[in-house]
Image (cartoon, grey):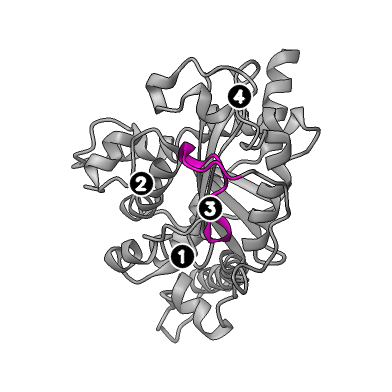
Amino acid sequence: MMIAPMNVSIFQGSRCRINTLAHLWSGNLHSWTRRYSTTSKLHDSKIPGIDGGNTKKWTRRPITTKTEGSIETPQRSKPSSIRHEVLDETVSASSTLNIGKTEITQFQKLQYCDVQRESYEKLASLLTIIVFDIETTGFSRESERIIEIALQVLRGGKNSTFQTLVNPNKSVENERIHGIKTNMVNRPDVPRMKDLIPILLQYVSSHQIPGGKVLLVAHNARTFDVPFLISEFSRSSIEIPSDWLFVDTLPLARELVKMEGSTLLKAKLEHLIDHYEIIREGDAHRAMSDVKGLALIFQRLTFDLKLSVLDILEKSFSASDLINQKKKKSSG
């Protein structure tokens, strides 16, 4: 992850602060909830195999930027409004006329803060945040397979959600967990992962702001979702794009559990849903239901923890980070 070195203490010392992610998309939680209640599917229709309810023949075709007209190309915020949306311009300055060494040092810090603030203002304006979830045939990423994947683009717009079952070419032994049966996925009209990956890449790319990065958010991403994606991409001899970053909300939830006065007792997704009184859309442990719940949780969790864009980026990791960590453990 190529981010300019940052001295966080300088931000704190000069009272230069970046707003929480809660302020990136809307002014309040209620309007945000209404805004992202969309149920649109890719191309405004279900990919065959979704929920096992469509028997139309699945054909591989690229996702274009057109959907009944077009997939909305994400628009950058106007330069004049970015600062208001992302940053609080609350920097302190000395009002004394007798400027000594301390005041000069503080002024230098403020100058540095302004430079870095502009840098992160630009980065935040180019960031595409996507919440995702997968369901699998088991826990082993070496022997088990993904059988469902869902995504939601937090910016919203047309085709802001994507969901499909995936043919694992093996039986599903853990139906009791997610309710996905073998006969729902082992069908010729349900795409296999090697066929789905190019479509997935095209979908994410269609929502990505040119020159920006994608931040993919999942609960237990570091030890489950991302390792599974790495394995599936590797089997297809495709690398996960280097401009994809990942954030795991599980450690964030654990921070909230430890926070004084918090009523959250456990960091599991279902406990977060109860904690924030979120009404589920669909069954628990189905990918899209979990994604829509997590999209709301991520918004509120970052708000409660007072996490800025900078904080989230510092907690993010890339696929190559996990791959290198695994290599070090193997060699050690």
Q: Are marks 3 and 4 in contact (CB under 8 Å)?
A: no
Q: Are marks 4 and 2 in contact (CB under 8 Å)?
A: no
| SS label for mark 1 | strand
Q: CA distance from mark 1 to mark 4?
A: 40 Å
Mark 4 or 2, nearer chain start = 4
Give the residue drawn at x 31%, y 40%: 256
Side of 330 where 90 appears, left or right = left
Residue 234 part of the magenta-drawn span? no
| Residue designated by label 4 | 145
Side of 63 where 138 appears, left or right = left
| Residue designated by label 3 | 130
Looking at the image, is 278 positioned above or below residue 212?
Answer: above
Q: Amino acid at mark 3?
A: Ile
| Residue designated by label 1 | 18
Q: How far across and how far down the image is residue 159, in percent? A: 54, 61
Q: CA distance from mark 2 to mark 1?
A: 26 Å
Q: Nearer the viewer, residue 274 or 284?
A: 284
| SS label for mark 3 | strand
Q: How far across and how far down the image is residue 310, in percent? A: 52, 56
Give the residue drawn at x 59%, y 34%: 166
| SS label for mark 2 | helix
Q: Are marks 1 and 3 in contact (CB under 8 Å)?
A: no
